[in-house]
Structures are given as C-alpha cells and as structure tokens.
Image (cartoon, grey):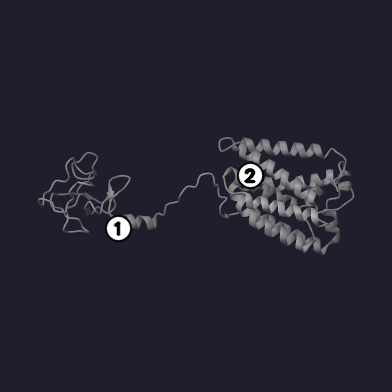
Amino acid sequence: MPGAQMPGAGEGSPGWPGPPGGYPGWPGAPGSYQTPPGETLGPNTRCYEHPDRLAGALCRSCGKPICTNCMVEAPVGWQCRRCVHRNARTSPVTRYQPGVAGLTRPGQAPITALLIVVNIVLYIIASSSQNFAFNSYEIPLFIQQGQWYRLFSSFFVTNDFLDIALNMFSLYIIGRLVEPALEKWRYLAVYLLSGVGGSVATYVLGRANEASAGASGAIFGVVGAYFVLARRARLNTSGIVALIAINLVFDFTYSGINWLAHLGGLAVGLAVAAGFAAGGREHKTTATVITIVCTCAVLGLLMLLPPGHVNLE
C-alpha cells in the first residue's frame, strides 16, 4: 500500500492500531476476518513467521497469527503463505478451456478399443477362410438380391494385412480424440453410419459386380467428425484438411482403392457430426435422435436405386 506505514516498519508502539481507515483483515476494520471462537488477536500478538512484526490477522487455514506481509487473500479471510503453498500441492487447479471439448489430447476410448479388437478378430477369421471373406465383401448385385448384411460386414471384414494395419492405426489415433468429445454412443453412431454411407456410395456409384471391403469409409467419417468438432472449438484445422487431401490424392492415383467409400463415409461423418452439434447442450438428445433418423432415411432412399445407377468408375 503506497503511502501507508505497515506494522513492523517503524510502527509507533507495540499497540499500533493499523493504517488510517483500517486494513482489510485488521481486527475491527469493516469486512475484516472474524477469528474463530476461542481464538484471539491481541494488540501485542506477533506474526508466527516474523516475530518482530505485529500480526494483522489469523490464517484462515491453520489459525496462526500473520503480519501484513504474510497475508494472502482467500475466498474468506486470509491465509499464510505456507498454507497457500500446501493447498496448491494437494488441490491442483484445473483450468477451463472453453470450446475445446477434449479435442486437444487423447482420452479414454473404450468404443475405439472394442472396434479395433472386432476388426482384428474378423481379419484373422477372414484370412483363414476365403468363403467367410467372400461372403462378407460388398458386391452391389448380391445386395440387390437381398444380402443387405454386406452393407455392414464389408467395413468390418478384410483379409488384406496392410489395409487392416493402416486402418486400425488411423482409428486408434483419431478415435481417442473424437470419442471423448462425442461420448461413446454418439461416436459409435458416427462410425457405423459413416461405414454404411461408404457402402451406399459404393452401391450407387460403383460397379455393380465389383467386390470391395475395408474400414476406410467408417474411419473417414470419424475424421470428418473431428473436423466439425475442431471447427466448433475454433482449433486450427489446416492439418486435418491436409490429411484428407493427401488421402484423396492417393485414392485417385493408385488403383485398387475404393475412393467412393472414402467420400461417402467422409460426407456422412461431416453431416452426422454437424447434426449432433446443432442441438448444443440443451437439446443434445433431440438433435442426436433427429440426425440418426434423417441419416438412415436418406441412406435408405438411396438404396432404392439400382446398383451402379450412377457409375463414376
């Protein structure tokens, strides 16, 4: 306090009553800390840290007398510096970051771990049984004949080691960022709907008699969901945009890659994540239900078209 003489700094007498107008926390001053019953702060009470200085208050935490140099403002009354340091070690402060929603660091992702395990187990089975693998692939003509399960099985089953290794590594990285932000069941909905979206895109836009499989469409949908969440959290999305662009360049450059499933999964992932986010916190459940129902309706209507109706390959 500029211009105010402090206790222990040339005070006039042992019973110096404090600065003119009172000092917050000084006994009798307006708004001062009230000592607990049984505790007293006399005119000659000395600071426990500085015995040569008069005490101006009692520590709210330990109850010891402290001078003005030792007084640290607390929510109620004052604390000594030792108590402040001790409380800081035992009760660390978690700082709030608005809008980030868990996207800045990986978190717990049990659904991601379950999906990885399921994909690896089915890969092992498909690698040892060609019939199992063939019956799981997406072949649009067979789907038209009533084998609808291929829309789902095709993005869970593959017998290509490089495909399963790259896909599961990508899912492990991106899933641990997106799942904690979306929560488990909404994250699972994004994955499944994106996988179906990739299958529907292949059914409508690809060759009717061509077989395809792999989890890339579903994973592209999770990447799309990450983009939506990052944009809403006002994070830098240039890295994820570059990653999507590089993958699409590979899709169009190398043969044997089902780029239709990638685009279909990405489009559905973007749309579903945006629909989930539109409800905010107040209408999260309503927005989730409406988004899932509308997405299923659109994908179902597209399946009414004959396979390969718009062949882009």
Tell me how far mark 2 sits from mark 1, CA to CA.
Answer: 46 Å
- Nearer to me, 87 or 73: 73
Q: Residues within 10 Å of mark 1 (few under 14, many from 20)?
A: some
Q: Residue furthest left?
A: 13
Q: Position of residue 140 (x, y in %)?
A: 86, 47
- On the question of residue 219 being in view, the answer is no
Q: Position of residue 17 (x, y in %)?
A: 14, 46
- Nearer to me, 9 or 30: 9
Residue type, label 1: Arg
Which one is earlier in the sequence, the residue at label 2 or at label 1?
A: 1
- What residue would you read off at disc 1? 82
Question: Residue at left 57%, top 48%?
Answer: 235
As drawn, 261 above or below 161: above
- What residue would you read off at disc 2? 228
Circle 1 — which element? helix
- On the question of residue 95 being in view, the answer is yes
Question: Residue at left 24%, top 40%?
Answer: 31
Residue type, label 2: Val
- Left or right: where does residue 127 sit relative to residue 6? right
Q: Residues within 10 Å of mark 2 (few under 14, many from 20)?
A: many
Of tags 2 and 1, the one toward the viewer is 2
Circle 2 — which element? helix
Q: Position of residue 255 (x, y in %)?
A: 83, 57
- Left or right: where does residue 197 sit relative to residue 286? right
